[in-house]
Image (cartoon, rainbow, N blue to C red):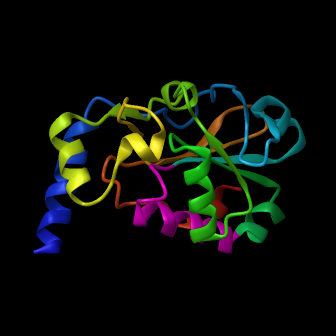
Amino acid sequence: MKKYLLIITALFFSLQVLAQSGLKKDTQAPLFTARDNSGKLLDLKALLKSHKAVVLFFYRGQWCPYCNKQIKQLQDSLQLLTGKGAYVIGVTPETGENINKTIDKTHASFSIIQDKGYAIMKAYDVNYVVDDALNSKLKSYGIDLEKNNGNADHVLSVPATYVINPSGKIIYVHFDKDYTKRPSVSSILAVL
């Protein structure tokens, strides 16, 4: 029964994100400046000058087991990623308190940004609004987007991953509207 509920939820999420297409490989990455979970000011342009690449990924929240699995895999391979000169950044709509819950669950030690106004998510075309029917369904599973994100917008991101080179060009994209599909660390390492 639980399997069928997950399939139905996945179908609803897939229908919600039909309009989103994300950015394509070989396009210029939108620049941004934001504070991460530790208060550090991150400027993408400056990071690209001081690193061989930035691995930028978007996740939905601490309540998402697929997100936590991806974050844990990135953390487990962080030395490999940084060894190739990459700087890893996670972007989420969840509150700082919930980012801390994500860190507790995954032991993430890389930068995570709360995209409170969704500026980064919009720039990368990964944001979408969860409709009332799906929001009610999520609540029935104990997932309260208003509490998790600290607002009543019900905005989530398509879980997308981008690798950006020093010239600001996107050299790798994993954008799949099926939130259960995430890139392997080996596929990210292959482009670094």
Check the image and report above or below for 71 versus 13: below
Question: Quarter of the image containing the C terminus?
Answer: bottom right
Q: Is residue 72 left or right of residue 183?
A: right
Check the image and report above or below for 73 versus 43: below
The secondary structure that most of the magenta stretch takes on is helix
On whether residue 41 falls in the magenta region, the answer is no
Q: Residue drawn at (47%, 41%), measured in percent from left and top? A: 149
Q: Is residue 11 left or right of residue 91?
A: left
Question: Quarter of the image containing the N terminus?
Answer: bottom left
Q: Residue drawn at (57%, 61%), measured in percent from left and top? A: 101
Q: Which residues are magenta?
A: 59-77
Question: Camera-side residue: 133 or 91?
Answer: 133
How far across and down, in percent of the image, does residue 65 sit?
A: 41, 66
How far across and down, in percent of the image, does residue 152 sit?
A: 37, 31
Question: Camera-side residue: 5 or 179?
Answer: 5
Q: Residue drawn at (78%, 70%), measured in percent from left and top? A: 79
Check the image and report above or below for 75 versus 42: below
**Residue 158 seen in the figure:** no
How far across and down, in percent of the image, does residue 123 sit?
A: 54, 25
How far across and down, in percent of the image, does residue 55 sit?
A: 66, 49
> Image quarter for residue 156?
top left
Q: Residue drawn at (20%, 56%), measured in percent from left and top? A: 140
> Image quarter for residue 77?
bottom right
On whether residue 71 falls in the magenta region, the answer is yes
Q: Is residue 53 left or right of residue 6?
A: right
**Residue 59 seen in the figure:** yes
